Amino acid sequence: MYSHEYDNGLKLMEHSYIGNDFVSAFESLIKNKPQRVVWAGDYADECKGRKTNTYDRCKDTEKVKPTERFTTTETRYIVNHTKKQFVDKFSVSEIPMWKGTKIHPLPLLTCEGNGRGGGDFRGENKYIGTWARDIISVESKKPIGYAEIKPDFAE
């Protein structure tokens, strides 16, 4: 997927908000369909055994542009099937200076290469990038037997 096709910037924090069209469209690809996910921008790590990263390798490929959108209730839970963890988007805090705006945990949990350029997440958080390349889905029901994490991304 390509963020510019949704009138969003390429940089991580230019589109990582709950309700953002680009992130919502991505969620449609993993709603009730666990997939391996990595949010790879131009600062992402090089792929093992290669001199390029995932972003570079995808630049010239055909882009997927889903048009389906869901309500937050339908994609309330971000589920990591690899680590048996989940995030409840309803528990995400508002950004104090931007009333009504919440950072979407999915791009930050699954990103590679954060902190290497402008537009990246600037706060301290032990969860940033820890779900990169794990099997992820979004679900309407809380997963049974999984631990809830509250990454509380705040810049």
Image (cartoon, rainbow, N blue to C red):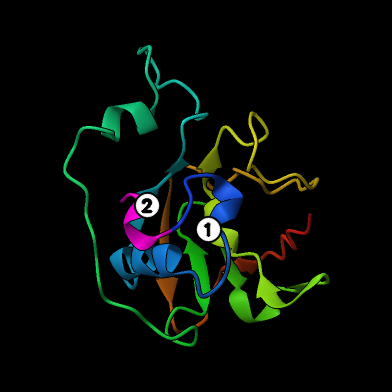
Q: Which mark is residue 15?
A: 1
Q: Is residue 9 above or below residue 149?
A: above
Q: Which residues are magenta?
A: 1-7
Q: In the image, is residue 3 part of the stretch drawn in magenta? A: yes
23 vs 104, left or right, is left
Q: CA distance from mark 2 to mark 1?
A: 10 Å
Q: Which residue is mark 2?
A: 4
| Mark 1 crowd level (few <14, some 14–19, many ≥20, 10 Å Cα) | many
**Between 72 and 144, which is closer to the camera in this rendering?**
72
**Which one is nearer the viewer's eye here, 151 or 23?**
23
- Quarter of the image holding residue 65? bottom left
Q: Secondary structure at mark 2?
A: helix
Q: Position of residue 1 (x, y in %)?
A: 31, 51
Q: Residue at x 29, y 64 (%)?
A: 29
Side of 91 relative to 45 (left or right): right
Residue shown at 39%/53% (left/top)? 3
- Under circle 1, the secondary element is loop
Mark 2 or mark 1: which comes first in sequence? 2
Q: Which percent across, then down, holds residue 33?
A: 29, 66
Q: Residue at x 49, y 88 (%)?
A: 73
